[in-house]
Image (cartoon, rainbow, N blue to C red):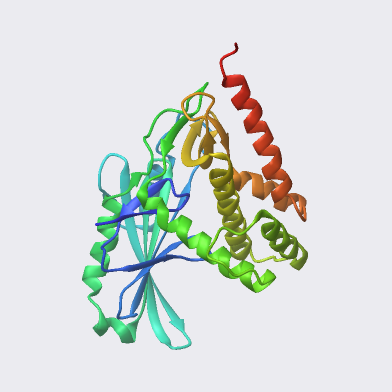
Amino acid sequence: MPRLAIGDLLMDIEIPARLKAAYEKSGALALWDDSGAFTLRFSGITAQPKDLAERDACLREVIADAAKKGLECVRVSDPIAYYRETKEVRWDDGPGKNEFWFAGFGNRELVATLTYFDADLGKFDLGAERRIVVDAIRSIALAFPDHEKPTTEPLVFDVRPSQQLWFSHHRADMARRIQRATGYDSDELPPLSVLDDYWSKFIGAGESDNDAVNMVLNGIAVLFGDHLARGKGFEWAIVSDAYGVCLAVVKYRGSANLNVDPFNFVVKRWQKKEHTFLANGYAWLCDYADKIGADLKPSG
């Protein structure tokens, strides 16, 4: 079965190949089949405990929450436990249910939601879909080698196949957004001038919906990282350093390990409401990379 990344993309789960998959504006991974009678959603968060040496904050919280609610908590293994609760809901088209699974995985929490109308229960195998969720929870793993945070040089790991759908999703979503806003229509990576044009229009529109904003921030970050990869020899990777773990682009891997977090780079410009920065930021980073490269060359 294929594995797909969820949450902060640093953990992934096994998903049956028969299910269709896409990422939603909220960042959740949505799954469905040809019946259209149900939707499965998986999302995740990472806790930052006060004691940085603590490695099971979410696991303990899930166990405690289940006890408070009087619900059975299933201990899958040493780092994983989960419980399930069901809530009846009524939509315009009729009554239905949201079945929630809350799983603690060390300092990460996975939330799975199975949504369906009561009238559609005969169109799919409810037990089979529940087993998909439980099997996914049992399959939770980190999408990078789990090392202690390095105190000096960063550790660099390859991007996993489970993360590729997320990248493809954001590239395709940004292509549609850029075409609508600027008229640029091409399967190629949009030029930095086009990205700056789109970004300026986005800032000027004053978008306030958090999910929509996050989609654009992530999408612009992916395209900016793609430009650094294509034009300056950076590569997408997972970087672990004293501050945490993130997706980044890296150059001089194995020596200088020069890394740029495009997501943080873009978020800071969003917070300042800078209207253009991509072309200038790219040029500055390229110059900086060249200086680092010159220092790495042996003298004489």
Q: Which residue is nearer to you in this view: 274 or 27?
A: 274
Q: Which residue is nearer to you in this view: 18 or 13?
A: 18
Q: Is residue 227 left or right of residue 155?
A: right
Number of marks in the image?
Answer: 0
Give how far across and how far down residue 118 sits, in percent: 33, 83
Give how far across and how far down residue 83 sits, in percent: 33, 56
Q: Is residue 209 visible?
A: yes
Q: Which residue is nearer to you in this view: 103 or 273?
A: 273
Give how far across and how far down residue 133 sits, in percent: 29, 61
Quarter-wise, where is residue 54 in the image? top left
Give how far across and how far down residue 100 sits, in percent: 38, 64
Q: Residue at x 50, y 28 (%)?
A: 154
Look at the picture and state if 159 lies above or below 4.
above
Q: Residue at x 26, y 62 (%)?
A: 16
Q: Residue at x 38, y 80 (%)?
A: 96
Q: Residue at x 60, y 13 (%)?
A: 299
Q: Is residue 284 left or right of residue 232?
A: right
Q: Is residue 61 visible?
A: no
Quarter-wise, where is residue 128 in the image? bottom left
Look at the picture and state if 203 lies above or below 163.
below
The residue most toward the front is: 300
Q: Is residue 76 left or right of residue 275?
A: left
The residue most toward the top is: 300
In the rendered image, the quadrant that contains the N terminus is: bottom left
Look at the picture and state if 66 lies above or below 256.
below
In the rendered image, the quadrant that contains the C terminus is: top right
Q: Which residue is nearer to you in this view: 267 or 229?
A: 229
Quarter-wise, where is residue 113 in the image? bottom left
